[in-house]
Amino acid sequence: MATRRMIRVGELIKREIADILCREIKDPRIGFVTVSNVDVTRDLRMAFVKVSVLGDDESRQQAVRSLNSAAGFIQKELSSRIRLRYMPKVQFRLDTSVDDFMHITQLLAEIKEGEEQ
């Protein structure tokens, strides 16, 4: 169960990382990235940043690898923007919830189409 502090810190990190990606990161391998969620561990030492990326599967994986290689720079920028006793270590993960939603929607449409016939 997430505490109120974990949720607040996660939202703050989410907002700042989105700004950093928009203004500071100029890596063409990253492409169009949206920060969808940040999960912070109970001790506030790790932040798992879920991102959704436009493109095919290979470009998505490349974008996540590029973000994880830039994690040190992003943590440094976060530490200059946010005052915390310990700055969480940032790890990026691909958010597949949009793909899952599209797949479920497609399956439901196929079922509906099958019932109508």
Image: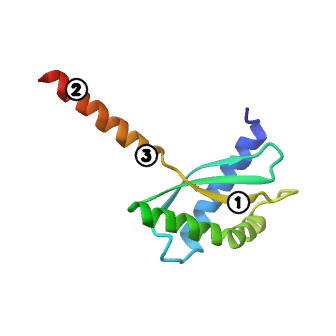
The answer to whether residue 19 is seen in the rendering is yes
Provide residue 41's location: percent of width, then percent of height. Answer: 76, 46
The answer to whether residue 32 is seen in the rendering is no
Residue under circle 3? 98
Provide residue 106's location: percent of width, then percent of height. Answer: 29, 38
Dot 2 or dot 1: first in sequence order is: 1
Q: Quadrant of residue 74?
A: bottom right
**Which amino acid is tagged 1?**
Val
Provide residue 7's location: percent of width, then percent of height. Answer: 71, 42
Q: Quadrant of residue 4?
A: top right
Q: Quadrant of residue 42?
A: top right
Q: Residues within 10 Å of mark 1 (few under 14, many from 20)?
A: many
Q: Nearer the viewer, residue 114 or 84?
A: 114
Q: Nearer the viewer, residue 37 or 60?
A: 60
Mark number, residue 90: 1
User: Is residue 45 depicted above or below 31 in this figure?
Assistant: above
Q: Residue at x 36, y 41 (%)?
A: 103
Q: Name the element at disc 2.
A: helix
Most distant residue in the right direction = 85
**Which amino acid is tagged 2?**
Lys
Q: Residue at x 59, y 64 (%)?
A: 19
Mark number, residue 112: 2
Check the picture and name the quadrant holding the C terminus: top left
Q: Residue at x 64, y 72 (%)?
A: 70
Residue 55 vs residue 78: left or right?
left
Q: Residues within 10 Å of mark 2 (few under 14, many from 20)?
A: few
User: Is residue 3 depicted above or below 9 in this figure?
Assistant: above
Q: Name the element at disc 3.
A: helix
Dot 3 or dot 2: first in sequence order is: 3
Q: Name the element at disc 1.
A: strand
**Which amino acid is tagged 3?**
Val
